[in-house]
Image (cartoon, rainbow, N blue to C red):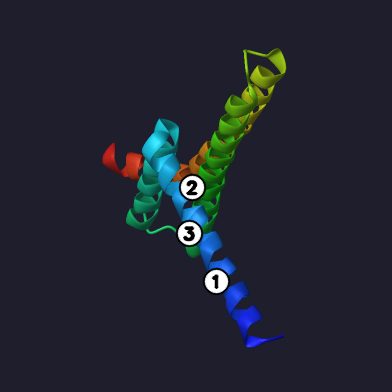
């Protein structure tokens, strides 16, 4: 492979990161739910360090938070494409948007369950010690 082709490939690879970052910034600026999920993820991770959770627990919380944020990004992308294609309100477009939103809801629900399973025991210990 020639040096020129290597640089072209590297440039294209780096450019793809720029496109991805622009998409994340766009979602942050334009999507209220994205900002809410990002704030929730930040608070959860701060709490994880405050509670001195294990490395494994922090990794699980981080992964579930990233899944929620990713689901919200995919939902936003689907909605934008469908809005572009939709000349008038169509029941299939509505169904597709509802299904994408349902995916976000399931991901959020799962992350809440993971959070309760991880934060539940240390919260109960702290509550019991406060109530004595």
Label 3 crowd bin: few (<14), some (14–19), many (20+), radius 10 Å:
few
Q: Residue sitting at 38 percent across and 59 percent down?
A: 52
> Front-most of 28 and 36?
28
Asked whether the residues under the numbered discs 2 and 3 touch, taking CB atoms below 8 Å apart as contact, a structural biologist would say no
Quadrant containing the N terminus is bottom right
Q: Which residue is mark 1?
A: 11
Q: Position of residue 27 (x, y in %)?
A: 45, 41
Q: Which residue is mark 3?
A: 18
Q: Residue sitting at 51 percent across and 44 percent down?
A: 69
**Which marked residue is nearer to the observer: mark 1 or mark 2?**
1
In space, the residues marked 3 and 1 are separated at their CA atoms by 11 Å
Q: Secondary structure at mark 2?
A: helix
Q: Secondary structure at mark 1?
A: helix
Position of 10 relative to 117 (above/below)? below
**Which marked residue is nearer to the observer: mark 3 or mark 1?**
1
Q: Which residue is mark 2?
A: 23
Q: Position of residue 121 (x, y in %)?
A: 46, 45
Q: Residue sitting at 57 percent across and 37 percent down?
A: 77
Q: Residue sitting at 27 percent across and 40 percent down?
A: 130
First in sequence: mark 1 vs mark 2: 1
Quadrant containing the C terminus is top left
């Amino acid at each position: 492979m020639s040096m020129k082709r290597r640089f072209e490939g590297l440039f294209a690879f780096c450019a793809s990161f720029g496109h991805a970052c622009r998409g994340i910034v766009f979602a942050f600026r334009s999507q209220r739910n994205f900002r809410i999920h990002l704030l929730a993820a930040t608070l959860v991770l701060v709490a994880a360090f405050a509670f001195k959770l294990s490395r494994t627990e922090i990794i699980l919380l981080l992964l579930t938070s990233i899944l929620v944020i990713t689901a919200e990004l995919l939902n936003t992308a689907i909605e934008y494409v469908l809005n572009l294609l939709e000349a008038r309100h169509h029941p299939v477009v509505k169904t597709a948007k509802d299904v994408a939103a349902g995916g976000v809801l399931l991901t959020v629900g799962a992350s809440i369950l993971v959070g309760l399973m991880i934060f539940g025991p240390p919260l109960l210990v702290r509550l019991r010690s406060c109530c004595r």
